[in-house]
Structures are given as C-alpha cells and as structure tokens.
Image (spheres, grey):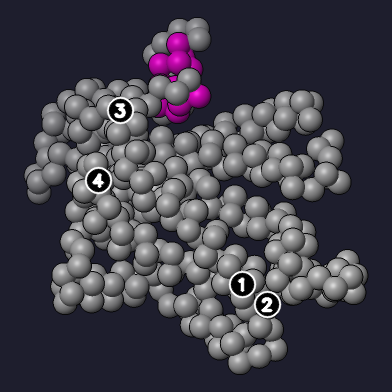
Amino acid sequence: MLSYMIRRLGYGLLILIGVNLFTFFLFFSVNTPDDMARLNIGGKRVSQEQIVKWKAERGYDKPLYWNEAEAGAQKLTKTILWERSVSLMMLDFGRSDARQAVNIGHEIKTRMGVSLQLAVPLFILQVIVSTAFALMLVFFRNTRIDFWGVVLCVLMLSISSLFYIIVGQYFFSRLLKLVPINGYAPGLDAIKFLALPIALSLLARLGGEARLYRAMFLEEVGKDYVRTARAKGLSEQIVLFRHVLRNALIPIITSAGAYLPYVFMGSLVFESFFGIPGLGAFVIEAITGQDFAIVRTMVFLGAVLYIATNALIDIAYTWVDPRVRLA
C-alpha cells in the first residue's frame, strides 16, 4: 500500500501543477492586468496613472511569463506566473486583489469552520437518509410503495435546487417565521440559521442519491449469496442490512466520497442565497469581482481536496472489502 500511495502522491503533484498552470493561462487569456485594475478601481473614468499604481501595489506590473529586463533566473522568477501561481505550491496564498487588507489564508481558516457547520451535518444526514430510503424501497420492491417512491425520487431529481430555496424561504421564513430567511450567527445561535439550508439541500440531493442506491441494492438482491441467505431462513430485514448493504458499501463510498470536497469547500448556491459567510460565498464574491488571487487559491484547494478524497476512497475500499488490494 505504501508504494501505491507514493505513486498517487506523485500523480497528484503533477495534477496540481497542471491545474495551477491551466487556471493561470485560462484567466489571463480573457483578462489582462489592466482589465482587472479598471474593474477593481471602478468608476466610469479610470486614468492610466491609477491603473499603473494599482498594478504596482499588487505585483501585476511585471510580465506574465518571461521578464526580458532581468538577468539569469530572475527572467523567470520576476514574473506574474512565478509570483502568483508557483507560490501556491508552497501554500503561500497572499492577499486579495480587490482588497489588499484581506489575507486569503486567514479568510480560509475563518470561513472553513462556517462551511463545515453546514456541510458536515448535511453529509452525514445525506448518507443515512438516502441509504435508509433506498433500503425501504428495495424492501417494498414491486409494490405501490416502491413505485411511488421512485416517482418521488424522479420528481425531486427534476426540480432545481433554486426552487427548493425560494419555496423554503417563503414558506418557512416569511409565512411560518420558524427560521431567519438568511444570515449567520456564531455558537449555538447558528442552528436556527443553518437548519433550513441543511434541510433544503438534503431534499434537493435525496432524489438522485436514493435512486442510485436503490439501483445498487436491487443489483445485489438478485445475486446468489442473497438467495442462499434467504434459504437459510434469514428474515428480509437481516438479509438487507447484514448482506446487501455490506456488499453495496463500495459504490456507496464512491458516491459519498465524491461529495467530500464540497464538505470543506462549502456550497456555492446555498451559502450565497442564505447569506452564510463560508467558503462557497467567498468563491462567488471572488468570481463576481474577478479577484484572481482568491479564484486561483480556491481552484488549487479544490484540486488538493479531490486528489486527497480519491486516495481516501481507495483506502476505504480495502477496509470494507478484504478482497480489494492496492497494487
């Protein structure tokens, strides 16, 4: 396993470098430092002196890839590419382009806790509720409960998450006044602000997850070991929970593991609509303001989380199925 993880680490490093370079090339192919300066300075009339000053303060007055004015290795190091992208590999996130007083690393540490308060309960509830609902449909397979359960899953899967947010805010916040319509408060007061987005996000994902798990469980139900278990006189509940669920853990881990990066990165849509100051809202603000410093950092962290998650999923396979070997 050690050699396998070392190889995965090497592959992951190459992927990070590629993602980092691609993000840089893509951003500056549609934006120039002058465009960024005009957008951040604002106003209808921006003088060239203001643009030059803005670029000098943030280090965008250097060439993008190659600095002919320097000598030796500084031709490469005294460039925007080196100072803005290569520094990420050393986890030096720097400061925001739009607001120089904002330290990106500090913002990430602060906002990650808020995003985790929303995403961790949602992740746990999502796995439990989706698995339980799918097992119930399989238990009542070929009945009206199964039929209408699948119809409900398709219906929930077909509705946009924005619809859940709008209806949920109107019904539970404006009409019933059970929870605040948006905002956030630290400590235990956060529960009343996070309850509605957690419930709506769970509802938005339940249809797709439950339908996927149901299909996996139905595939297991038709296998020989399940028929053998029934022939031994085991009840259907024991067969489902002790045998079917255990043998379907690998696809469940794959599906649930794919959501893990969102646990740390935050939900872009729900944090923005509910005014939750997490990493998701941080990314939306950066994209809206074309803050390249924040965008490149969040893309880099997203790539790190995806690589780490895939490695953890592979390790988890060996825990739930002894037949799996990492080679």
Residue 243 lies left or right of residue 84; in this view the side is right
- Mark pair 4, 2: CA separation: 38 Å
Q: The residue tagged with tag 2: helix, strand or loop? A: helix
Q: Residue furthest top?
A: 72
Q: How many other residues sit within 10 Å of disc 3, few (<14), some (14-19) or many (≥20)?
A: few
- Disc ID at residue 47: none
Mark 2 belongs to which amino acid?
Val
Q: The residue tagged with tag 4: helix, strand or loop? A: helix
Residue 52 lies left or right of residue 144; in this view the side is left
- Disc ID at residue 138: 2
- Mark pair 1, 3: CA separation: 41 Å
Eye-nearest disc, 4 or 1: 4
Let me know if residue 91 is in the magenta part: no
Return the x and y of residue 312 as percentages of the image width and height. Answer: 64, 39
Return the x and y of residue 99 as percentages of the image width and height. Answer: 20, 33
- Disc ID at residue 106: 3
Q: How many other residues sit within 10 Å of disc 2, few (<14), some (14-19) or many (≥20)?
A: many
Q: What stretch is highlighted in magenta?
A: 74-89
